Image: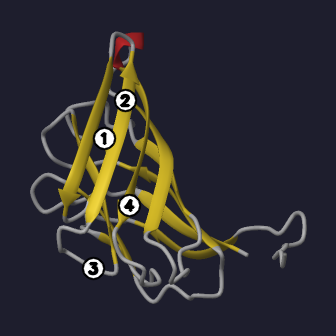
Amino acid sequence: MPLHESSYGTPAVELIERKLLIATAPIDFQNIPPRFTHLKLIGSVRDPSANVHVGLRFRFNNDSGNNYSSSHGELDATSFTGITDITSSYILFGRVLANSVSIDAFTVFELTIPDYTNPDHFKSCVGLFQGSDADTSAGQMIGYGGGVWRASTAINRILVWSDIGAGDFSAESCVSLYGYL
């Protein structure tokens, strides 16, 4: 049976970094090269709206059809909440802290997209997020999420945005896209 192996210790390659100097929406990674096996987004983001937190959304290849399914779970000091969406025009991944919390509070996340060019299957993603909407243990949240884009097309574009208003992210938000061989 043929087996594809990559060398041990192959480092990730940062393809694009978006660090915002002003509030901007969405963060858009275009022309993603097909020469890697996996992609990873790593971010530290905040929404400028007058909310405590809002949703974090992803879309691939600017496909706005109802071709996505997603779920995420969140654990805070008092409860666990799970959300599933089986027919949507985006992947709802988790929560982003917004302007009703401390000005220095940002949500951090990692989202992995394995085998993003394989034409033989739908594209899936999975990841973690964390934030603190208060200076007490009750305001801590950690979560996980993931989803499926029901398309076998190679991913060449990723949009990232929040789900309130224009979908802006605050200044100093930063998202990086990495490729793994």
What residue lies at 47% left-to-right and 58% top-to-bottom?
Answer: 125
Using a 10 Å C-alpha cutoff, classify the residue at mark 3 as few (fewer than 14 neighbours), some (14 to 19) or many (20 or more). some
Quarter of the image where the N terminus is located: bottom right
State how far apart marks 1 and 4 are (Cα). 18 Å
Residue located beneath label 2 in the image: 74
Q: Amino acid at mark 3?
A: Asn
Q: Is residue 176 visible?
A: yes
Instruction: Answer left or right for 95 relative to 110.
Output: left
User: Real-space Cα distance between discs 2 and 1?
Assistant: 9 Å
Q: Which residue carries the number 1 mark?
A: 95
x, y percent for residue 123:
45, 69
First in sequence: mark 2 vs mark 1: 2
What is the quadrant of residue 115 in the picture?
Answer: bottom right
Q: Earlier in the sequence, mark 2 or mark 3?
A: 3
Dot 1 amino acid type? Arg
Viewer-nearest of labels 2 and 4? 4
Residue 170: x %, y % from top left: 29, 54
Q: Are marks 2 and 1 in contact (CB under 8 Å)?
A: yes
- Extreme residue toward the left, this view: 165
Front tag of 1 and 4: 4
Name the residue beneath numbered marker 4.
148
Q: Which residue is mark 3?
A: 62
Question: Of the residues under marks 3 and 4, which one precedes in the sequence?
Answer: 3
